[in-house]
Amino acid sequence: MMTVSTLSDDDSPQKGALHAKSVEKLREMIVSGDLRPGDRIRESHFCKAFGVSRTPIREAVRTLAAEGLIRISPNRSPVVADLAEVDLGHLYDVVATLEAMASEQACRVITQGELVEIIAIHGRMLESFERGERAEYLKLNFRIHQRTVEIAGNPVLHATWLALMPNMERARALANLDRARWLGAVTEHSKMLSALAARDGALLAALTRAHFRNGLKVSEKFLVPGAPAPL
């Protein structure tokens, strides 16, 4: 299990802040794959790891259960939900459609300053890939997708996209455990950035859909019964 920094009362004396930080850290561990499907969420362990009482952990578990990341069963410890419980095909289709729409709109309205911002994030993402830093890569990857959706300026699309992200990020992290797919995703992102820089919305939308189709193929392999667990 990954090493996590503790949350002390000095860092955030407010109950709500401790809850938010506990949610953030648990979500990150699940999305990154550090906590695997079926892993038990033991209150005592995470209280010690995060330096908080049981209440923030319990509230965090309920929050993440509502997002579909944790499964709560009567008289049993909460466990990380299995991605097989999610219809990945439909999930990928919907997110790909949303991001393709956002890509076309972003190409029409993006400013030079916003483009420079995304280019900088992309550069840092490539550096994290070269160093093999998956967690940092995934954060920067998410930020690129997020900024594209934000720049599109459609609040309904943005809200719908955000609601789907927890399980989408889990699936994306799973796909990138395959080294060949990770390299493929990096190459695809470079092409997508070039289309964005050229303000070619139709091309960027097509590349975005292909990007998600390629990711789905790999994610689904890990959900086949008997498939080897990714390392």
Image (cartoon, rainbow, N blue to C red):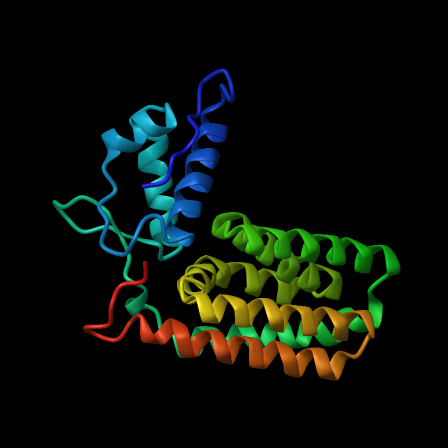
Residue projecting furthest to the top: 10
Q: Looking at the figure, which quarter contains the N terminus?
A: top left
User: How many marks do you count on the picture?
Assistant: 0
Task: Identify the residue shown where x is 36% and y is 57%.
Answer: 68
Residue projecting furthest to the front: 130
Residue projecting furthest to the right: 112
Residue projecting furthest to the left: 75
Within the image, what quadrant is residue 167 found in? Answer: bottom left
Within the image, what quadrant is residue 226 found in? Answer: bottom left
Q: In this view, does 230 lie above or below 94?
A: above
Which sits in the foreground, 61 or 33? 33
Question: Which x, y percent locates residue 78?
Answer: 23, 46
Question: Which x, y percent locates residue 146?
Answer: 63, 58
Task: Identify the residue shown where x is 29% and y is 68%.
Answer: 85
Task: Identify the residue shown where x is 34% and y is 29%.
Answer: 49
Question: Which x, y percent locates residue 8?
Answer: 44, 20
* Direction from residue 225 to residue 7 in the image, left or right: right
Question: Which x, y percent locates residue 5?
Answer: 44, 29
* Direction from residue 138 to residue 219 in the image, left or right: left
Which sits in the foreground, 100 or 192? 192
Q: Is residue 131 above or below residue 204?
A: above
Q: Looking at the figure, which quarter contains the C terminus?
A: bottom left
* Direction from residue 119 to residue 91 in the image, left or right: left
